[in-house]
Image (cartoon, grey):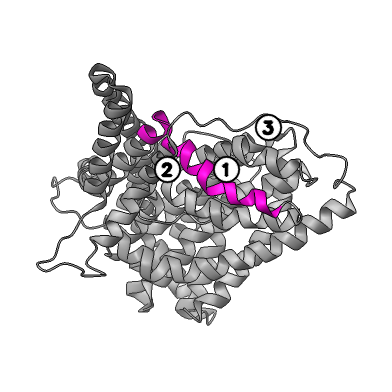
Amino acid sequence: MTIISVIITLVMIGIVAYLLTNKYNPQAVLLFSGLIMMAIALLMGYDLPAMKKSTGLGAFDLFAMITEILSDKGSKVGLMIMTIGGFVAYMRHIGASDALVYVSTKPLTYLRKTPYLAASCVIPIGQFLFMSTPSATGLGLLLMASIYPVLTKLGISKVSVVSVITACTVFDMGPASANTAQASHQVGLEAVDYFLHHQLPLTVPLTIVLMIVYFFVNKYYDKKEGLNDQEGEKNNGEFKVTAPLYYALLPVMPLLLLMVFSPTFDLFEPPITLDTTTAMLACTIVGMVLELIRKRDLKDMMSSMKIFWEGMGRVFASVVTLIVCAQMFSKGLISLGFIDHLVDASQSAGFGFEGVSILMTTMIFLASMLMGSGNASFFSFGPLVPHIAAQLGGNKIGMILSMQLASSMGRATSPIAGVIIATSELAGISSFDLAKRNLIPLTVGLLSMFILKTVF
């Protein structure tokens, strides 16, 4: 029975990977694969994962589990992610995101004499922007409109410029990130605590590593392929910002509020704590008030609230449903004994917890590369971490952190990822060439993460 369940599990994972790679709807693929695996588990006499309340019939429990997950995720991490989506949509609508990008990238113009250093400096600046604008494709397009013409006019090749722009999205981090929300929820931490004490200490040195590697890799390949002097962009158009520049503060305001009013710092007596959902709502209202003062049009300000609700709805349809369906997929794997088999195989091979952690992290990196989605791969396998840690007694925070970062790194090496396709099309280059240019730095980044994890 054990061998049969292992074969079925591997076949199902292979089918899921194939379907996702071929652009089948990820929610449908993950949901139906999870239901099929749990149905097979029932037929084989296995127990389904524990539920709060069973219907009394295994067939009905399959669907009751969807209801239970939707209720749990929708009211907790799902609501938080939806308000983030609404806030980001509203910031884009009023031009605050453009203002932030303009202000943040302006200092790069002072590095004209060292173009490849200027290009590498885009990475930490862009990473900061990514924490405030947690959409890889959205940020990529903003940077293509703002910093791409600046760097190409310095004589750097198109593929090198776009490579550092996409590198800004390789660490899905910060309290406004859906992956952060999911990861912190799985390990029972507040998003700010997870960000400050676990993400930052690891991603800061990793960002420095990437800056160095991208500097030498881009300079080497531009010289080798003779791209330095022949592809300088002659576009004299400037990045237009319609909003006042002080609007640049609005997208980072939630991050600042969450840190100031976090239990981590304990700055107030009695304590004042602020959760991500409340911070996003408060900052959206601040943005609306500023719009009213600027435009003096009450009807327009009231109408703009629709942008926020529509942003929430889009994120529910794309991200929250993906979390729910991925949870069903992970429960299907658990019901067929995937965790037990993985633990037994790892112990037989002498891996231990760290070995399993490296294996899962590498698997997610490759899955993101194949699927073109960091969310799909991380949401599929992230929920397994608490079960693996319980079996092997390891550090579940360290494991889920490396898996989370690997998912977004793998996305930037995928020629079918949204951010890779969108930016490469704007630059007029091949998405495969861009993915190949990112492969060496991000493989070095992945190996560096394994080394740095032993320190942090």
Sequence-first tag of 1 and 2: 1
In front: label 2 or label 3: 2
- The answer to if 99 sits in the magenta stretch is yes
CA separation in Å, label 1 and label 2 = 42 Å
Residue 51: x, y in percent?
Answer: 19, 54
Q: Residue furthest top?
A: 299
Residue 387: x, y in percent?
Answer: 34, 67
Secondary structure of the residue carrying numbered label 1:
helix
- The magenta-colored residue range is 89-111
Secondary structure of the residue carrying numbered label 2:
helix
Q: Residue at x 52, y 54 (%)?
A: 127
Residue 425 shows which numbered tag?
Answer: 3
Residue in the foreground of this view, choosing between 256 and 359? 256
Residue in the foreground of this view, choosing between 205 and 349? 205
CA separation in Å, label 2 and label 3 = 28 Å
Look at label 1 and name its amino acid.
Answer: Tyr
Sequence-first tag of 1 and 3: 1
Label 2: which residue?
Answer: 248
